[in-house]
Image: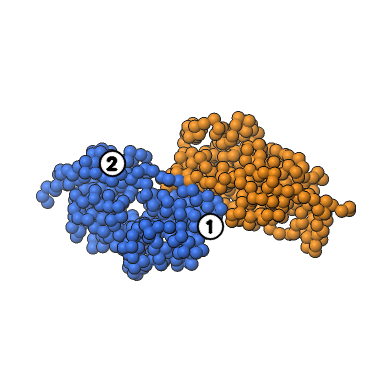
Chain colours: A blue, B orange
Amino acid sequence: MPDLTNRQILLRRRPTGLVLPEDTELVSSPAPEPADGEALVRTTYVGIDAAARTWLNDQPGYLPPVQLGEVIRAAGIGEVVKTRCDAYAVGDVVTTLTGFQEYVIVRDDVFTTPVPGPDVDQLAVMSVYGPTGATAYFGMTGIGRPQPGETVVVSAAGGATGSVAGQIAKIAGARVVGIAGGPEKCRAVVEDFGFDACIDYRAGDLPAALKQHCPRGVDVYFDNVGGPILDAVLGRLAPKARVVLCGVISSYLTGEHPGPANYVNLLSKTALMQGFNALDEWGRFDEAFAALRQWEQQGLLKHRETVYEGIESCVDALNGLFTGANIGKMLVKVGEPG
Amino acid sequence: MPDLTNRQILLRRRPTGLVLPEDTELVSSPAPEPADGEALVRTTYVGIDAAARTWLNDQPGYLPPVQLGEVIRAAGIGEVVKTRCDAYAVGDVVTTLTGFQEYVIVRDDVFTTPVPGPDVDQLAVMSVYGPTGATAYFGMTGIGRPQPGETVVVSAAGGATGSVAGQIAKIAGARVVGIAGGPEKCRAVVEDFGFDACIDYRAGDLPAALKQHCPRGVDVYFDNVGGPILDAVLGRLAPKARVVLCGVISSYLTGEHPGPANYVNLLSKTALMQGFNALDEWGRFDEAFAALRQWEQQGLLKHRETVYEGIESCVDALNGLFTGANIGKMLVKVGEPG
């Protein structure tokens, strides 16, 4: 095998708001050689998640901030090209924290998951039966627990996690109403992902639209956005409602989190609001992947992707998450699968 | 038995803020005669709870608003003086929604509980092993679930519910920090109710005080107040924290509920915040009363009362809840027990 060149995007300056060109640098260097117990993975797709933006801020979280000079952290998928460990063979497809780079060293550690078979549909893994799907699965089934006939609302319903979360609620027999920005996304939420309805929050008067679409209140709210949308849905809770806190995308750029005044409905409706992190359910990922894969193969779980091309597109793709550029999972294709 | 005169306080105008003299009227009329299946109770103590103030607003809740011309609703305790039903004998002591009045008709319905023995300590029932204690019990044991060594924070710690909730957490082996207004209350919280510490929120810089008293974060927060105090404690949550929403006394007068911006810590700490209503646990009240009574008799659960005298003091007592006039349960002694 010839020497491999690894192009990487490093953090040079902490961004405020969207990531500017001066905040990052694209560098090239030889791909590292795996040591004993390691393997080298060639990245095929980098997944673009809102969490990646939070890791650029100098604030504590469930993972430490990316330091200046480090590769920008991101979850992705790739193929083993060299191995010096028993866990992986050359050709294995794995999901791991690839970061914004073309090659990455992996160990058999908590963030690396081999996926079923080398001919797996890598897009489906990134969208449905990988970590994104697991996030939707554990949040919806573990906290939301939708029952047949209940009304479930999902924000960022056109996004990767929201689209899967809503479909899981449909499979559970609930009526599912999405919230998304703009008519094109709302159309995709209903036509592609099979939600019963989708509210365009940009069209104004969200409380009135929620009242119209959720006449008996909201039993489960899967929240990816926070801010005024969370507040509006809290204002419409049904008794014994469950609010699943999955993300706060409305505030990731600014760090500002306006408080939801309607939180008091958690008291008057004896409801709960709970945050979660799919990694806490690591021991049950196989269960989640099996269920998600089965639903996908049965045609019950549809996925779409918005795919940018080339490692140099990673920052544009990340910014695009916050400007609403994606329907379904936002990915950057860094290398050819297979 | 001679004819009985029943003095009642009726709602005449919906108050905004504290209840003004013109908002209510003290009227006298003959006490009603029980019909078949009913009994007449002579009120001994009226319990003064913040919920009573919410029922004066024209807004939906778990009970309907008090209508103009109706007796102001409140939970209390009294003794059966006439009976035409099997459920109660003359001399029985019962807790029920007495309202602000000297006599009340009861049926064997969901809001009426006979208490153990005619010589029971009625103050202890109102403070500990009655509905107030049940509220603390179900909130703390059902949602808070404190573990030995955990840090539990209770707001309105000098009040009826908070003082019991904190002592239940102590019995569970937790370290318990109260929040109360003023040095006298803080002293009572530590010396009378046995909390490990108490923060005087009026002394300023609550976040710094929380950091000092809860160096490893707050595992359980039992919230009676909402507003900036809730927000400050949310800013100090430990991983997997449980926030018990019991009341929003900071906003009952105004109807204003500032949103807690630090709710986002529910996500970063994978914590939960849950409202509850003790009435939902009606089927388990006996269990709660038995546990609370045992703890009280073992000397593990102390109680104090602030007692006003006479039916005409009810409105002052209710207003006093919001100006911080009580330590322990706020009661109005309306008739002589025994």
Q: Of all residues shown, which one is farthest toward the bottom?
A: A298
Identify which residue, B137 or B325, lies in the foreground: B325
At x 61% / y 54%, what residue is drawn? B58
* Chain identifier of the residue bearing label 1 in the image: A
Q: Position of residue B9 (x, y in %)?
A: 73, 49
Discs 2 and 1 share one subunit:
yes
How many numbered discs? 2
* Chain identifier of the residue bearing label 2 in the image: A
* Residue A254 in view here: yes
Q: Which residue type does callout 2 highlight? A: Pro
Q: Residue tagged by mark 1?
A: A240
Identify which residue, B174 or A231, lies in the foreground: A231
The mark nearer the N terminus, 2 or 1, is: 2
Residue B333, picture quadrant? top right
Q: Circle 2 sits in a helix, a strand or a loop, which is it?
A: loop
Q: Callout 2: few (<14), some (14-19), or many (20+) C-alpha neighbours within 10 Å?
A: some
Identify which residue, A105 or A234, lies in the foreground: A234
Residue A306, picture quadrant? bottom left
At x 28% / y 41%, what residue is drawn? A15
Q: Indicate left or right for A325 with B320 as reference.
A: left
Q: Which mark is residue A15?
A: 2
Q: Indicate left or right for A257 with A297 as reference.
A: right
Q: Of all residues shown, which one is farthest toward the right?
A: B2
At x 68% / y 58%, what residue is drawn? B110
Identify which residue, A171 or B103, lies in the foreground: B103
